[in-house]
Image: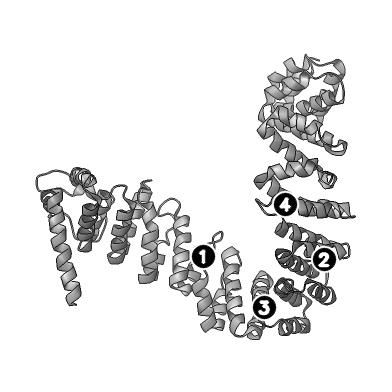
Amino acid sequence: MIVIAVSAVVGVVVGLVVRSSLGLGNAERASDSSISDGAKVSEDSDSELKTPKGRTLAKDTERMKKELELAPRPKRMLWFATRAENATPDELRRLLRLAGDDYAMKKMIAARWAAIAPQHMFDSLAADLRNRDRTNSGLMRTLLTEWSRSDPKALIAALDDEQLYPRIDSTRMTASHYLMLANPEAGLEVLERWNVRHFIPDMKKLAEWAESSPREAAERVAKINADHAGLEALGAVGKAWAKVDPEAALTFALELGGKKQEQFASKAMEVWAAQDLDAASAFASEQESIAFRGRLARGLLAEWGKHDAGAALKWAQENLKSQARADAIGSLVSAAAKEDPHSAAALVTEMNPGGAQLEAAKELLRSWVKRDQPEKIREAVDWLGGLEDHKLAKKALEDVYWHFIWNDPENLFAIVESEHGHILDSRVIHEAAEAQVRKSPQAALAWADGLPEDRRAEARRGVVSSWLSMQPAQATEWATGLPEGPQRDTAINAVAYSFAHRRAEQLKPWLEQLSEGEVDRVRGILKTVRNTDEQTKKIDAVLAEF
């Protein structure tokens, strides 16, 4: 108590000295007398408060703010720290404005405000957000961190009104994160109460609760929706329970159904398999329900595949059927690929043709193809190119080609150009062509012309159609200027299709540049394209002139 008292006295003295040195003493004393100690915030409270001389507090605040900005930072920090220590909620609100753009200072003031008057602070921030003022919106996180610990019920009640201010869903997601850390039961309540679907809060404290009271935690989690956050919570509880009593956890899983059972059982089994593989595999083998055995298998094989993928595959083939087998083997291959993709590839190659092999190949590629690792990508494509079953290679690659489009187009171009380009689906080649056009249409044409014959025509079609969508006038002029031959025919056809969605009045001058046979071909193409009645009428009117 003595230390606290001395600290307080020293703080006050230092503060007085600093205020005097800053020249702020008179201004502060003048405005302090008029600031209310009440905790209720008015959205325009500054306009209601007057200094004794009749000046508005807003003007006083601006003057003090300028004086503070000119002061050395150490003195400024001392002034704010001392003032915040005994400030009322309304005074803290004013101090926040005086802090200007100094985020560290604002965060310190916000922490004090959240500690002594969280509801007042929330009402103030909410009022700003209703007025589209996001200046201090970043401080909401400071409030939620403190409030979730001090009074979770009040926090939940404050955020219950979804119309309170724009984008309140974002605040709710952040609140669910801090509530889950401070009080898992409250965190679970808001996941369902606020319908939090596309956000996964931290599950660490939930796992700790599940380790100490596993059935209680599991029964509570099982009641919430089976969406992203709900399934993640189930998985966390399943893993935590399995650490202390895996068989009891999996017996509880039998009480669940559908996605909930799959998530809980697979996560619990994964933990058990890491602890005691023999006991875990024996338990899974003994299950009479094929569906439940399949759900257990995902976690079992994901762990088993890290150590002995061959034995795990044999178990899957002997104990699982149809889709359950395919899904479980996919998990197995994914786990094995993280340890050794080449061994996993050999495993997939040796599998019997069918759905299970395709799912395994897809999982292998998802694990193998990583951004910024071109050597891994080439290895994966070399493996695909070496498969005797080209249909399998095409279907597997279709599942990951988007990775190249968005993250690694240069490697996609290299694959299209390579000896293994024949395994690519026409859609993938078309996407590669579009990515080339974004760089340079003329360079894209040259690139397409240089490809092997079996994919050249598809690449050219992709270039022309993409160019037409990006720069229709330039692409049309280029196509019209081509000499007679297959290249011109392909280009004219592409332009014809594009006119189904372009201004009809642009069609006539273009048709005037074409031969009679080309006009007839364009007419046939446009007749096959579905369009609005109005656009069809306009196009027909133009075609009637030829």
The image quarter containing residue 485 is top right
Q: Give the numbered dot on residue 375.
A: 4
The residue to which callout 1 is attached is 201
Judge whether 401 appears above or below 449 on screen: below
The residue to which callout 2 is attached is 347
Q: Does 147 sit left or right of 239 as displayed?
A: left
Q: For the residue marked with disc 1, what is the amino acid?
A: Pro
Q: Give the numbered dot on residue 496.
A: none
Q: Give the spatial CA distance, label 2 vs label 4.
A: 21 Å
Q: Position of residue 425 (x, y in %)?
A: 81, 45
In the image, farthest residue toward the right: 388
Given this view, does label 2 or label 4 mark the residue nearer the observer?
4
The image quarter containing residue 66 is top left
Q: Position of residue 280 (x, y in %)?
A: 71, 82
Q: Give the spatial CA distance, label 3 vs label 4.
A: 31 Å
Between residues 162 and 241, which one lies in front from this camera angle? 241
Tag 4 near tag 1, CB within 8 Å: no
Looking at marks 1 and 3 on the same chain, the residue that comes earlier in the sequence is marked by 1
